[in-house]
Image (cartoon, helix red, strand yellow):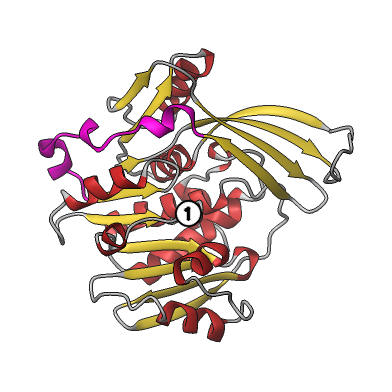
Amino acid sequence: MVFGSINMDLVVYSDAKPNDGETIIGNSFETFLGGKGSNQAVAASKLGADVSFVGKVGSDIYGQKLKEKLNLEKVNTQLLKEVEGESGVALINVIESSSENQIIVIPGANAHVSADQIDDKTLASVEILISQLEVPPNQIELLFSRVKQGHCYRILNVAPAIEFSTSLFNETDLLVVNEIELEALTKKKLKDTNIDSIRASVDLLSLAKHQAIVVTLGAEGIYVRDQNKDEYIEGHKVNSVDTTGSGDCFVGAMASYLLEDKNLFDASVFANKAASISVTRKGASSSMPTKDEVVNLG
């Protein structure tokens, strides 16, 4: 189950990044199903997992379209509710020369996502529960606290890098962060992005025995720590086109693997492959690979 955000992504592709006050001519414009929660749900579904999505859309022109797009990806939307007002929207500029992106998110209906959308009976049937910080953190905390430890694996993608409570941190089994989000968690700047520096930063978190962390490092790969064991996994060299949603692809792919095999290190290797495929395609949810594509990647 994914408890999270769903947006309509409005994406502009351009060769360069405009300076302040500058107007440039873009190359193309497209709309995609997006939002971190939705992207993660689609990634897991395309890899064969049975996924339910819990969130909210608005009563505007995007709301019904977003629900239809999610249904087409074979994600269960029974717990996706409509609220009066605007759906979430993301304004995304993809700089094609570097495949990097700039993103501004307007939360809209995502600000109204609530833990009480899920009853206890439904929650008891969930094996893995994923959330991100594009929906109210206090509602994530309420939901995570209702799960019996050990019965359901709770994954928190600490994105975007905003403040959240110590209680939510303690109720999380697996934290997934990038370098910026790791700095926000530790409140300390990384000296550099080598593994010794990452390891020292993770040490500052004083993780509990039941907790693990994965630090995504873009093209450089990932760092994983679980049960006092850690490992660095190198990135795959690919022709990157659009990095939008690659972190979400990683989370969804990792969760889908953990349903079959509880080894976090093997799941991270699998997810690393999936994310490397996603950056070779445009869009967020539309870039998610199938299981065959990931398995057959060298």
Screen quadrant of the N terminus: top left
Does residue 78 sit above or below 219 in this rendering? Answer: above
Tell me the residue at 34%/42% (across/down).
2
Element class at badge 1: loop
Tell me the residue at 70%/47% (across/down).
101
Tell me the residue at 39%/71% (across/down).
265
Per the image, is 113 magenta? yes
Highlighted magenta segment, given as a residue range:
107-127
Does residue 198 sit above or below 75 in this rendering? Answer: below
Per the image, is 118 magenta? yes
Screen quadrant of the C terminus: bottom right
**Which residue is at the front of the view, 152 or 159?**
159
Across and down, in percent, residue 82 comes to 36, 19
Residue 208, located in which quarter of the rendered image? bottom left
Residue 194, located in which quarter of the rendered image? bottom right
Across and down, in percent, residue 200 comes to 48, 84
Left/right placement of residue 38 relative to residue 174 reads right
Secondary structure character of the magenta stretch overall? helix
Q: Residues within 10 Å of mark 1 (few under 14, many from 20)?
A: few
Across and down, in percent, residue 184 comes to 50, 64
Tell me the residue at 48%/53% (across/down).
159
Does residue 101 sit above or below 188 in this rendering? Answer: above
Amino acid type indicated by mark 1? Ile
Left/right placement of residue 114 relative to residue 120 reads right
Residue ranking furthest to the left: 121
Across and down, in percent, residue 206 comes to 33, 78
Tell me the residue that label 1 is attached to.
162
